[in-house]
Amino acid sequence: MAISFTLHATDGAARAGTVHTPHGDVSTPAFMPVGTQGTVKGLTPEMVRDAGAHILLGNTYHLALRPGDEIVRDLGGLHTFMNWNRPILTDSGGFQVFSLAGQVKITDHGAKFKSHIDGSPLELTPERAVEIQQNLGSDIAMVLDECPPADGAPEVIRRAVTRSIKWAERCKRHHSRPDQAQFAIVQGGLNLDLRAECAKELVAMDFPGYALGGFSVGEAPEAMHAALPACAACLPEHKPRYLMGVGRPQDLLAGVASGIDMFDCVMPTRNGRNALAFTDEGPVRLRNAKHRRDPKPLMSGCGCYCCANYSRGYLHHLFAAEEMLGPTLLSLHNISFYLNLMAGARDAIRAGRFAEFRAGCLARWTPAS
Amino acid sequence: MAISFTLHATDGAARAGTVHTPHGDVSTPAFMPVGTQGTVKGLTPEMVRDAGAHILLGNTYHLALRPGDEIVRDLGGLHTFMNWNRPILTDSGGFQVFSLAGQVKITDHGAKFKSHIDGSPLELTPERAVEIQQNLGSDIAMVLDECPPADGAPEVIRRAVTRSIKWAERCKRHHSRPDQAQFAIVQGGLNLDLRAECAKELVAMDFPGYALGGFSVGEAPEAMHAALPACAACLPEHKPRYLMGVGRPQDLLAGVASGIDMFDCVMPTRNGRNALAFTDEGPVRLRNAKHRRDPKPLMSGCGCYCCANYSRGYLHHLFAAEEMLGPTLLSLHNISFYLNLMAGARDAIRAGRFAEFRAGCLARWTPAS
């Protein structure tokens, strides 16, 4: 097995563990910064590592289109290509095909679509998704799934579940790389019966890890929070559980409370590029003129490179002057914030006080200033 | 005196020395990366420091308009504001007033102009240029000068010389910050008699350092190369000599050969952002499709962070995908290239083989590929 999972402690449904991978260990609950196109936007790998990231996410759809998975393979694989020697998880491209590509036609065989870059026709099948990820050489690959929208009709969601199960089977059969683990993805929208049915089928196939897909696709966050405990409980206790593409800090805490181990989201970097910072006192908008003369750090007590070295006044100036260093520093702080949040959650779970930790965080985070 | 200069070795007209400043020593010949708006575009201060920079340039015009020199002062001065504890030189804003601002009206009193940001009316006088730079707190400040265009009529250039001399006198009289040195600027275009006359007047005022302004403003590089030896020879031997805003690597070598000690230029960072790299084999355009599958570093033998960790194929991908890390890595390499060139020049001067060093560089640098 390419990966294994050790469960160290539980606190209610919340879990603290370690995912062991060919490129090192990942302490869970873990946040995975997103390196869509083979780079975490605006940051060097050393910055991401020094912020405390154990694992990154790479994007199969984007990398297969550009530069192409065979080029990545020929340039040494994704770890070497992007200069990141810690673990990498790659998604299957399913979500991007459904969200980004034009004119998608999905059959049981796979998804035919047009590239969002140049409109060229392409096809993503379960087998091709496996091959791309084997070429990329990630530590954890995801099966191809069909991700239905939150407001999909019941028959649309059922069809996506049926197809995702069949595709998972084909992905498992086609997968051959011994130094790469393959995770299955549970779909089913907010229908808990469908989620349970999907999980049951996939668990029977004995994947080394399981993900919940199809959340944060338009539903109310509260609806997701309500669904997560039951969804997580359908997954094996001794394998890692990954909630895909989620979310805000409060969503991560809801996920951890439900027994989720791994998360990824573009919010820290995307918001950072747009001058919006996550802090212990809630979101801070650095473009706000009130920061202009402020000598204080973005977040007092934060040990990240941004907060240790720069004032809010300087950060405000960087965004006003449209300097690249602004997005870089705020992305770095936001990633640090997410990683520190997960580190705090791990400590709290081991100490049996996760509920207090979560409540304390939620009480502190106030609306954007 | 805020600064002093030690001359270690000469080789023909070329000089190796040290400028001692309140924030540390600068080995010369020195290249100063440009931090126009309080940041070297796309790089952290640590990246610039680790590339070997001893001193940065800050821009008086830009910083006075945004965020404002009083804000920089109140936030601890430019060193603290931008997190750079090594020496900083600030230009006087004269060049930007003439190149960037709209509707400039110059009288003997000063320059009235409209901000390039919002069109607001502003005035820059010699006294105001001194005050701004005292607020910024740079180690080396420049006097306000009038920079005539290369194709200016003889009377235009003569008037700029006369005015620049008078303004230098007013700047010297107004300057009061003991931990800041003030350099004078010699104008005169390509008229060597005017240059000598201007230098003579300014040298009589006993500034701690002297600059040549008004080069790289449209004249042929060869015309500048031809003028530099005589211009440099008009300046005191035991004070630093600074050629402003120049230039390409071959221009720096021509300057060093003429006895210049300090240089600044936006080319390494601007070209880096545009995917153009300086290498030992001449310029390399990373957008060129031939680099797509190339596992080699940008420049073999280069020890910079970019060349030590990334392939040409990856750099090509970053620019194709419009990722911020591309401009960052190429800016870093280009600055390293300039800094290493100056380090090589220093070694060569001390070893009495600068002419061979220069000839070897020029022979290697071939046209862009």
Image (cartoon, coloured by chain):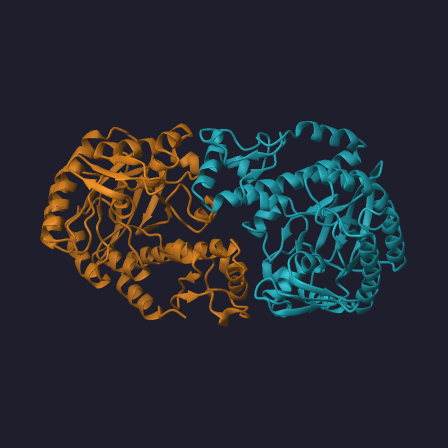
Chain colours: A orange, B cyan
- Number of numbered discs visible in the structure rendering: 0
Left or right: residue B224 compared with residue B136: right
Q: Where is residue B66, by image quadrant?
A: bottom right
Q: Residue at x 83, y 45 (%)?
A: B7
Is residue A196 at all visible to an observer of this figure? no
A265 vs B37, nearest the viewer: B37
Q: Quadrant of the C terminus of chain B?
A: top right
Relative height, residue A96 to residue B289 (above, below): below
Q: Position of residue B184 (x, y in %)?
A: 80, 57
Q: Position of residue A16 (x, y in %)?
A: 28, 52
Q: Residue at x 46, y 33 (%)?
A: B313
Left or right: residue A224 compared with residue A158: right
B201 vs B158, nearest the viewer: B158
Left or right: residue B98 compared with residue A205: right
Is residue B300 at all visible to an observer of this figure? yes
Q: Where is residue B76, by image quadrant?
A: bottom right
Q: Position of residue B22 (x, y in %)?
A: 73, 58
B137 vs B217, nearest the viewer: B217
Q: Residue at x 24, y 61 (%)?
A: A221
A154 vs A14, nearest the viewer: A154
Q: Position of residue B252 (x, y in %)?
A: 72, 40
Q: Where is residue A270, by image quadrant?
A: bottom left
